[in-house]
Image (cartoon, grey):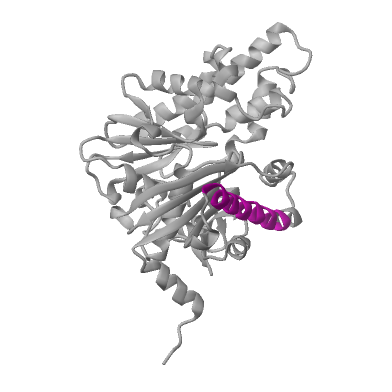
């Protein structure tokens, strides 16, 4: 009689529990910290019940964020740096998980499973010819074996690669969580996440998973963060409470040129990232606008400072208008309400621009529905890990274009 390996036996035992304590970890394209969410999950799939136990965002150690961002630029990256930071980020994720357990008063031994998205450093959704193949690729760092070793429980990670192998773009993956948690029998909902990149999930009233449509709308906070970082020489890495944008005036000419960006014309499925809207793009904007790096922190005339505020206001408006434009072009039906999550939901100027761009369609924070808008994505990867253990497909074909697949790799 075959003896089941201890690791497989443990996975089976976890899968058979009526309720699991799962820890979700992720860091987005803004690289502004590690989101850690501890959730209690009963069941799985469409009927899963997901309850947030604790959530916190933990900053990277000094200097690590800058080194990660350097990996995202081929001009400043190297294979040895990628190799090293993969394990460094794994340690950072493990420490964030342990810190959340400590802060929540939960024994790490009580955690059944970890779902870790990792930190994306490159995402290539458009296929590149390689002999007889057309190859899409993506790379997330944050070694899951380190997390498994430090926490002593199984880890599910590297979710995007299976979807790409199944013909998809590897993103967005959170729409599965949106459908499980936010579908409504009578309302057509657009669930808008505004992280570094903006992405929308369209949930038609009473619709099944096969009717869900999702895609990256374009830049979220990435251009705002990048422009602010350059204008302040890194003293500020984001526009806190939208205060800089609020001091500026939107430049309609520049906004019009930004809205002509080729990505916005591309029909779904589509994804984008730092490769398109990263710091090189931001530097070109400053040059085009005749502004020097450091304008907001160095001796500059009042006119230069005002133009700097105008630039921040304009890229903030670009995020809002690119979202509204994507809805008009590509959503398959009407929108009754928009639910916003992610860091951009905490930017009042951006939220005001978004409401203006969408007209009479109500824009609400996801918190109003009892789901922590900041925790949502980390919660999503906890659910993806949970359902991977149950053998359930968790990619959304109308989001990624991939065949239904069980996502993630399990580290025992």
Left or right of residue 367: residue 220: right
Find the residue positioned furthest to the right: 299
Q: Which residues are magenta?
A: 83-104
| Picture coordinates of residue 75, whole percent (x, y) | 74, 44
Q: In the figure, residue 235 lies in which quadrant?
A: top right
Tell me which residue sits at (50%, 19%) in the image. 349
| Picture coordinates of residue 223, whole percent (x, y) | 59, 30
Q: How many marks?
A: 0
Q: In the figure, residue 62 lies in which quadrant?
A: top right
Q: Is residue 113 visible?
A: yes
Tell me which residue sits at (64%, 26%) in the image. 227
Front one among 281 and 389: 389
Find the residue positioned furthest to the front: 105
Left or right of residue 89: residue 333: left
Find the residue positioned furthest to the top: 302
Q: Is residue 94 magenta?
A: yes
118 is higher (above) or lower (below) than 216: below
Tell me which residue sits at (52%, 41%) in the image. 272
| Picture coordinates of residue 77, whole percent (x, y) | 73, 48
254 is higher (above) or lower (below) than 151: above
**Quarter occupied by the N terminus:** bottom left
Q: Is residue 167 visible?
A: no
Front one among 173 and 318: 173
Dominant secondary structure, magenta: helix
Left or right of residue 393: residue 112: right
Q: Is residue 24 magenta?
A: no
| Picture coordinates of residue 19, whole percent (x, y) | 36, 60
């Amino acid at each position: 009689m075959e003896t089941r390996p201890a690791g497989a036996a443990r996975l089976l035992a976890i899968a058979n529990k009526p309720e699991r304590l799962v820890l979700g970890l992720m860091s987005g394209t803004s690289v502004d910290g590690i989101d850690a969410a501890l959730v209690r999950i009963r069941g799985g799939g469409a009927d899963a019940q997901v309850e947030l136990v604790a959530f916190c965002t933990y900053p990277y150690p000094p200097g690590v964020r800058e080194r990660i961002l350097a990996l995202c630029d081929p001009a400043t990256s190297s294979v040895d740096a990628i190799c090293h930071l993969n394990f460094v980020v794994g340690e950072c994720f493990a420490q964030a998980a342990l810190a959340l357990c400590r802060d929540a008063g939960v024994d790490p031994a009580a955690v059944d499973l970890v779902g870790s998205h990792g930190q994306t450093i490159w995402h290539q959704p458009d296929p590149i010819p390689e002999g007889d193949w057309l190859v899409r690729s993506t790379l997330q760092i944050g070694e899951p074996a380190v997390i498994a070793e430090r926490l002593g429980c199984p880890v599910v990670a590297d979710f995007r690669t299976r979807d790409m192998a199944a013909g998809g773009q590897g993103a967005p993956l959170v729409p599965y969580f949106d459908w499980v948690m936010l579908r409504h029998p009578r309302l057509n909902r657009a669930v808008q996440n505004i992280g570094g990149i903006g992405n929308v999930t369209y949930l038609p009233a009473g619709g099944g998973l096969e009717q869900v449509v999702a895609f990256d709308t374009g830049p979220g906070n990435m251009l705002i963060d990048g422009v602010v970082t350059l204008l302040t020489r890194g003293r500020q890495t984001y526009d806190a409470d939208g205060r800089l944008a609020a001091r500026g005036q939107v430049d309609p000419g520049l906004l019009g040129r930004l809205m002509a960006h080729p990505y916005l014309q591309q029909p779904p499925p589509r994804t984008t990232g730092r490769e398109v809207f990263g710091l090189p793009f931001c530097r070109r904007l400053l040059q085009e606008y005749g502004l020097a790096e450091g304008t907001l922190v160095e001796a500059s005339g009042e006119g230069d400072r005002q133009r700097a505020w105008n630039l921040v206001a304009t890229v903030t408006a670009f995020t809002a208008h690119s979202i509204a434009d994507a809805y008009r072009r590509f959503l398959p039906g009407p929108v009754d309400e928009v639910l916003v999550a992610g860091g951009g939901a905490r930017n009042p100027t951006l939220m005001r621009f978004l409401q203006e761009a969408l007209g009479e369609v109500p824009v609400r924070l996801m918190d109003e529905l009892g789901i922590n808008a900041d925790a949502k994505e980390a919660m999503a990867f906890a659910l993806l890990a949970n359902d991977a253990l149950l053998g359930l497909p968790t990619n959304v074909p109308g989001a990624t274009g991939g065949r239904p697949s069980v996502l993630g790799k399990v580290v025992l």
